[in-house]
Amino acid sequence: MGQIHELNSILADQIAAGEVIERPASIVKELVENALDAHSHRIDIVVENAGLDSIRVIDDGDGIEAGDVALAFKRHATSKINDRKDLFRVQTMGFRGEALPSIASVADVVLTTAQEGATAGRSIHLHGGEMVANQPAPARRGTDVRVTELFFNTPARLKYLKSPHTELMRITDIVNRLALANPAVAISLIHNDKELFRSAGNGNLQQVVAAIYGIQAGRKMLPVQGSDPDFTVSGFVSLPELTRASRQYITITINHRYIRNFELTKAIIQGYESKLMVGRYPIAVINIDLDPVLVDVNVHPAKREVRLSKEPQLAKLISQTIRQRIAQENLIPDVPAAD
Ligand code: ADP
Ligand code: MG
């Protein structure tokens, strides 16, 4: 007999989880993105002990059909794409069908869900990827996912986690970015019974900026807007006088997906020309609207990095848009360039 055999699905899911679920913040990201894809208006995130004890995400979205609930925990099972052509025009946050099975393979998960108008909902319980229960539940519209005992069966992962303080910072950071990317959705974060963040969900991006960076900062943000035949760029950037010591306060979203991109971040900074002091960076939230065919989100399992067609053209548009807006302001004299 040969030595090659297929891994059982739970082990395969655990291996996949290694790429998608690194820490509590990754779970928050995946669950909130699922809630966003389900057209939720309101998403509440409730976390205990920086997510190490419990993470719960409650939404008021579409819900899952009772008969589909178990399937949602199968790897590569998704309602979001059908064929290869869809893969090249992804409009949703998710499409890989990996988050739920990955999370379930390394934790204890209870998902309760109901669709609008359904007479009953459904609740499913999995422990380390094994199904414990799948039973009727109250017909409350939306989905409620509770994750506990994170990494109970992957001790190395558990050890690799940083202090609760650091893990909580990462959760707060991702929640802030998701809220900046989706100002029309009311998002709240509660940690150990204390509210850390809440957005109104009224579509006012400047208010979300103020909720995160403070009211003073919110007042010193300039709206920006620019477009070319391929891209529309909009958002808020701080006056040159309002800076921070790191690039972390720059958020870039593409079609409401928060991404990290060095070149585009650089383009934002370049929009300020010589108006920033060395080592100082603006606060900025820039959303880019584009035809999904211009972006490949299937580069990294966590989808933080994307591949963009026409990136130099977009970088130019961003710099130009910001440069023009700042020039209009002219509130403070130029700081001499350092070099
Ligand atoms: P993906 O998001 O890539 O499709 P997931 O494993 O995250 O994969 O979720 C699997 C499926 O479960 C989704 O395609 C969706 O149909 C359903 N689902 C998950 N979370 C929610 C939710 N909060 N509301 C409605 N449906 C959900
Ligand atoms: Mg998903």
Image: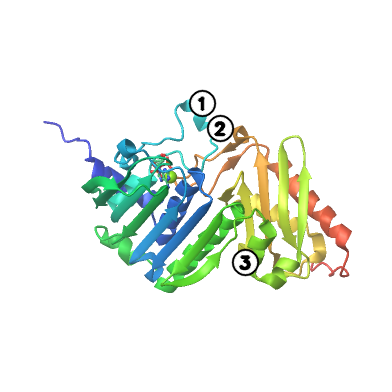
In the image, residue 294 sits, relative to residue 34, either above or below, namely: above
For discs 3 and 1, the disc positioned in front in the rendered view: 3
The answer to whether residue 279 is seen in the rendering is no
Q: How many angstroms separate mark 3 from mark 1 (CA)?
A: 39 Å
Label 3 Cα crowd, 10 Å radius (few <14 / some 14-19 / many 20+): some
Q: Which mark is residue 89?
A: 2
Q: Which residue is mark 3?
A: 211
| Amino acid type indicated by mark 3 | Ala
Q: Secondary structure at mark 1?
A: helix
**Residue sitting nearer the eye, 14 or 205:** 205
> Which of the numbered marks, if any, corresponds to residue 186?
none
- The location of residue 303, given as percent across then percent down, is 50, 46
Closer to us: 277 or 253: 253
State the residue at coordinates (48%, 43%). Answer: 38
Secondary-structure class at tag 3? helix
User: From the viewer's perspective, is 209 left or right of 329?
Assistant: left
Q: Are marks 1 and 2 in contact (CB under 8 Å)?
A: yes
Image colouring = rainbow
Q: Is residue 321 visible?
A: yes
User: Is disc 1 surrounded by few (<14), some (14 to 19) or many (20+) residues within 10 Å?
Assistant: few
Residue in the image at 22% along x and 40% along y: 7
Q: Position of residue 228 (x, y in %)?
A: 77, 38
- Tag 1 residue: 85
N-terminal label among 3 and 2: 2
Look at the image and tell me in which quarter the C terminus lies: bottom right
